[in-house]
Image (cartoon, grey):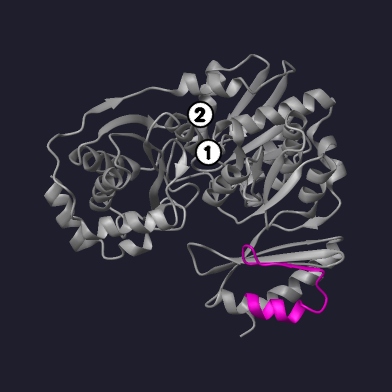
């Protein structure tokens, strides 16, 4: 079987270089990613990480089953034992892999159904990324692995009840909350269904789209796009719920809807959670990103914390938090990183921390957020471009005379008296991502028109 898979991969997957990204492996199923690729990746992981045991998990995509099977065969053929946790969200996988020397999650996160891929961890939850992924890629390309004298064993493990129990240790209030959860047919449905079965009686969870379906029949499982949350917003109002929760495909990102049906950007959540974390860890370091609102830095400082700027991407955040000993980290995309769980995402921990804060302050979510509405920020907008770097340099030069601050840590962010913008190239696509925040709606419209014209100008 191994030789057949290698032969199939070498002859039918000529675009392997396209699937090794900065932070993970991702590609189109049946095109540049197939069972042959998965098999070789499994063998390469064992060789590169010198692993004797590998934890494996997968999401609900149809292609995850054959990819996971081939991955497992590759790992075992290279002599390592496989512990298969089956279906799981990415946060559940991270929590479980803390006890293992290596782990692989088969998932393409929020990407469309045709995609799939792998997230790889070493020595617990440390991401295999950047240079390490390039070295892993070279092993796969050569497909020349050392012979081994044993077939690795295979065993299955069930972890959902223990995972829910772990998460509930973060819930400190017995106040009743009525919560609508939209899982978008992704793995959040599996995990939050577990919460409904094993959770406390003070949480009344109303499920939306909990059925696991990798075709995402109801809406794209990407709550960063506020339009994907329309049905959830309506349901929160109809149910007279305290709040709504929106999850992405692999369940590692979370957005909230307040009791008035308003979609809340992740910057508001960042501030609220950071406030509670800093109450527990005075003067703690909080990692945030170049695309986030001014309120994030302002409120971290107001709460006595130390704001630390970071490049976008979960691997960058986890590395920065490890280096600085940060207490918490947050991205504009809805990724929130918990120091208590080795700097990884866990959406239930974020939900429980938010509930703790609301209960302690005796506020509805809209009331807690209202003081933070000092600026007007638009959703991230993507532009298809040929040369993102050239466009960023042109923008830098054209706005340099008026800028109060220029940040080039991750793309380009330029600060002005009453507005700012950030542009950065996508790691995976020919896109330039624009974020923009101003004092007023009128200024936002004006500046967006101005910037979009400059970005698309030929």
| Residue 188 vertical placement versus 45 (above, below) | above
**The residue stretch that appears in magenta:** 392-413
| Res 78 seen here | yes
Q: Secondary structure at mark 2?
A: helix
| Res 265 seen here | no
Question: What residue is disc 1 on?
Answer: 251
Q: Quadrant of residue 370?
A: top right
Give the left or right position of residue 452, taking residue 16 as reference.
right
Percent from the top left, x then y, of residue 292?
A: 71, 54
Say whether disc 1 or disc 2 marks the residue closer to the N-terminus. Answer: 2
Name the image quarter holding the C terminus.
bottom right
Cβ atoms at labels 1 and 2 below 8 Å apart: yes
Q: Residue at 42% across / 57% down in the picture?
A: 131
Q: Secondary structure at mark 1?
A: loop
Is residue 400 shown in magenta? yes
| Residue 274 vertical placement versus 436 (above, below) | above
Q: Nearer the viewer, residue 155 or 203?
A: 155
Percent from the top left, x then y, of residue 289?
A: 66, 53
Residue 272 is tagged as: none
Distance from disc 1 to disc 2, alpha carbons, whole Å, reads 8 Å
Is residue 205 shown in magenta? no
The number of callouts visible is 2
Question: What residue is disc 2 on?
Answer: 191
Give the left or right position of residue 283, taking residue 302 as reference.
left
Q: Residue at 73% across / 32% down in the picture?
A: 281
């Amino acid at each position: 079987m191994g030789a057949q898979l290698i032969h199939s991969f070498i002859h039918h997957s000529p675009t392997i270089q396209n699937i090794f990204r900065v932070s993970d492996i991702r590609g189109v199923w049946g095109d540049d990613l197939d069972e042959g690729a998965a098999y070789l990746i499994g063998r390469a992981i064992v060789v590169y990480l010198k692993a004797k045991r590998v934890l494996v998990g997968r999401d609900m995509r149809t292609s995850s089953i054959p990819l996971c099977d081939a991955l497992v065969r590759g790992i075992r053929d290279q002599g390592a034992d496989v512990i298969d946790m089956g279906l799981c969200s990415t946060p559940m996988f991270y929590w479980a892999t803390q006890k293992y020397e290596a782990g692989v999650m088969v998932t393409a996160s929020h990407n469309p159904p045709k995609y799939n891929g792998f997230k790889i961890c070493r020595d617990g939850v440390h991401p295999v990324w950047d240079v390490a992924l390039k070295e892993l890629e070279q092993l796969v390309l050569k497909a020349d692995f050392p012979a081994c004298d044993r077939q690795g064993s295979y065993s299955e493990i069930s972890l959902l009840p223990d995972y829910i129990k772990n998460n509930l240790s973060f819930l400190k209030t017995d106040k009743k909350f009525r919560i609508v959860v939209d899982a978008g047919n992704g793995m959040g449905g599996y995990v939050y269904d577990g919460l409904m079965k094993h959770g406390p009686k003070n949480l009344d969870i109303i499920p939306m789209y909990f059925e696991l379906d990798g075709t995402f029949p109801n809406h794209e499982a990407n709550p960063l796009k506020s339009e994907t949350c329309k049905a959830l917003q309506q349901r929160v109002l109809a149910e007279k719920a305290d709040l709504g929760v929106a999850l992405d495909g692999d369940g590692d990102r979370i957005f909230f809807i307040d009791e008035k049906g308003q979609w809340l950007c992740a910057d508001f959540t960042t501030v609220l959670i950071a406030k509670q974390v800093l109450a527990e860890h005075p003067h703690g370091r909080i990692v945030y990103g170049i695309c986030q609102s001014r309120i994030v830095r302002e409120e971290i400082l107001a709460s006595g914390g130390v704001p630390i700027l970071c490049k976008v991407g979960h691997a960058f955040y986890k590395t920065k938090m490890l280096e600085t000993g940060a207490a918490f980290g947050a991205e504009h995309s809805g990724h929130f990183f918990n120091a208590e769980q080795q700097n990884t995402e866990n959406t239930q921990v974020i939900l429980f921390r938010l509930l703790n804060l609301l209960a302690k302050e005796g506020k509805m979510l809209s009331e807690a957020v209202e003081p933070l509405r000092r600026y007007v920020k638009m959703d991230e907008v993507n532009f298809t471009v040929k040369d993102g770097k050239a466009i960023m340099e042109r923008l830098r030069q054209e706005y340099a005379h008026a800028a109060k601050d220029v940040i080039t840590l991750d793309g380009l962010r330029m600060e002005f008296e009453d507005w700012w913008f950030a542009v950065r190239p996508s790691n995976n696509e020919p896109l330039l991502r624009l974020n923009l925040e101003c004092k007023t709606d009128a200024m936002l419209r004006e500046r967006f028109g101005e910037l979009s014209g400059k970005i698309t100008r030929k």
